[in-house]
Amino acid sequence: MCGIAGWFGREDLDAVAGERVLEALRHRGPDGRASKSWPEATLLHTRLRIIDLSPAGDQPMSNEDGTVWTAFNGEVYNHRELQADLEKRGHRFRGRSDTEVLPHLYEEHGDAMFTLLRGMFAIAIFDRRKRRLVLARDRFGIKPLFYSADGSRVAFASEINALREFPGVDLTPDPQAIADFAGLLFVPAPSTIYRGISALRPGEIVDCRLGTDERVSVTGRRFHEFAAEPNRDLTFDQAVDDVDTLVEKAVVRQLESDVPLGALLSGGIDSSLVSFFSRRHVEDDLLTFNVRFPEDEYDETPAARTVADAIGSRHRTLEMDGQGGTWEEITDLMRVVGQPFADTSLFAVDRIAAAMRRHVTVALSGDGGDEGFGGYDVYWQIAAINGLRWAPAVFWRAGVPFVAPLARLGVVRPTLARRMRDLAGADETGILQTFFSWLGERDLRELTRPLDNVEPLRRLFEPEWRHSLGRGSSPLERLSAHAVELNVRLILANDYLPKVDAGSMRHSLEVRVPMLDEDLIAFGLTLPHALRVDGRKGKRLLRALAARHLPASIAARPKRGFSVPVDRWVDGSFRMMLRESLLDAGSPVGEYFVPRVYTPWVEAFCRGGTVPGLSREGLYQRVMMLLALDLVLRDLTEKHRAAA
């Protein structure tokens, strides 16, 4: 695991800029830093040593004759098989790191190499003979990669904060990205908050070529695309047997490490299965970790300890009691992402990553199991909604006046009236947008000031994958496939995985995600809806698998998110600073959002109150969204002042 960066083109950049970029990536690779330059390119690298700790694993790295060079962040889990094949073809290797297969693989297969890689990766390859730079990101988007292109130069980096250190990058805020962020709490790739910076999408190659006119052309294309293809002949028993084999193979494939390795064990089904199979195959004791909050609603310690006792791991619990979130801690963490990001479970990831790093360098996580196997509530909820799609819009609207008073009394969820309003007359895309967005189109129109050329949020929820559902597929099967797509393409790639990367790499901790094994997810995409959901319980197959290997109480546990009770966790000074920052007349948030709309949110949060129609989580997520944007815009103003 590492940090990578560099630039390509005839425009020369001084060594001081390169050092600033390397310093910005130091936390991703504290074990070493290096650079390699040519007249038309420079590759930069900071190393976190995981496999082959010797200098033979240092980067940037080349093939035998130095015509192909690479800088790489991530892990290639099938590198042993790839190396064996390359050696049969005559390639010579100096060490045993997974990085070394990359320049040889490019030499042998060109861009087709990326389809052969199993793992998580962000890769830069410089082909000296063709005067070509290739950037690529793994299929799921586990590892981040950003770039900036202006025709004369391409600059790239693992993190936006490092890319901002390159001179000449256009940091003008993008109104479309800000509007999207308000609705989602993240900015979806390929956009970023800055007009001059783009994110590689999962499974994308960016091809940069230096022409005879010394201009740099940039084109992007996908090397991998997903699609749901339900297998209606698959039986439940066969599916459980298949997933048993696939999960175990996925975990075993990701256990290779020359440094201490542990597992994040929340007590949920996914992390428990990963921990179980890890314990079965590691030679020494397996270290497992969880985080404990003082509120029972958020504490998963009893379940985690039940699993740890059952599998025989050495378990540690990180106590969050009495460690309130301060202004400095929270704002520093939010700035790590490099652009507005308001998923508050980032705070929990950061805390547990800091604690785990004192004991291990590599951690296995359960992330990804929900996406392929129907783990979220949306999968059983769409079945209920689908059963009522015959009802006209007036049915949904008529219920709103009756539900709202019940919400105020606490009889039903406070968000139910808003949900019914949004579902009125909604088509398939509209239904799923209601479930996956934090602010609906109507709420966004009220919050955002009129902005030029800003498109509705709905465009992000339209289907893009080419599903093969078969003739006569039911509306529910289509909804289910569409929901899987949104979970993988939109939410996982732009929210959950960036959150884990930012929170863990801040502490130089490599997090691996066995549940996102390519074979395992491919199998998950063949599941019909009936094998994902059983009544109001999702993740049907993984629950059955847990019942085989884990205590019954774990297999029966309801889905719980890895979240932080922000409104109870922050301290008093944080509330004071938050109010001063967001309600200050000079807050840059007011340039994009209407203060009349968001002021009641801030006031309610700071006094510990509520807002009609908003859940507790909905309120503090909106406030954190405002803060994340405020921080980025204020920092940008300060950067411009310093440069003036």
Image (cartoon, rainbow, N blue to C red):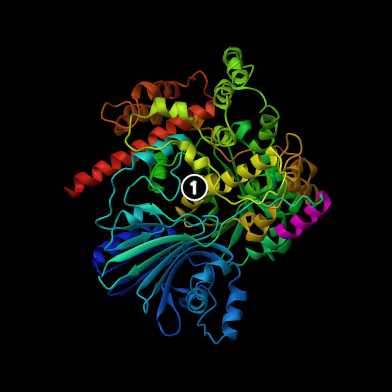
Question: Which amino acid lies under the numbered mark 1 shown in the image of this protein?
Answer: Asn
**Residue 9 horizontal/vertical position (percent):** 29, 68
Is 572 located above or below residue 163 in the figure? Answer: above
- Please, which residue is most extreme toward the left here? 644
Circle 1 sits in a helix, a strand or a loop, which is it?
A: helix
Asked if residue 74 shows in the view, the reply is: yes
Asked if residue 407 shows in the view, the reply is: no
Front residue of this view, candidates 353 and 235: 235
Is 127 located above or below residue 283 in the figure? Answer: below
Tell me if 113 is positioned left or right of 12 in this view.
right
Front residue of this view, candidates 372 and 276: 372
Q: Residue at x 40, y 82 (%)?
A: 66
Is 31 located above or below residue 623 in the figure? Answer: below
Q: Which residues are magenta?
A: 236-247
Whether 174 is among the magenta residues is no
Instruction: Identify the residue position indicated by label 1 in the image.
Output: 494
**Residue 472 horizontal/vertical position (percent):** 72, 44
Could you say which quadrant of the image residue 168 lies in?
A: bottom left
Whether 243 is among the magenta residues is yes
State the count of labels.
Answer: 1
**Residue 329 horizontal/vertical position (percent):** 41, 41
- Please, which residue is most extreme toward the bottom here? 90
Magenta: main secondary structure equals: helix
Q: Residue at x 60, y 85 (%)?
A: 88
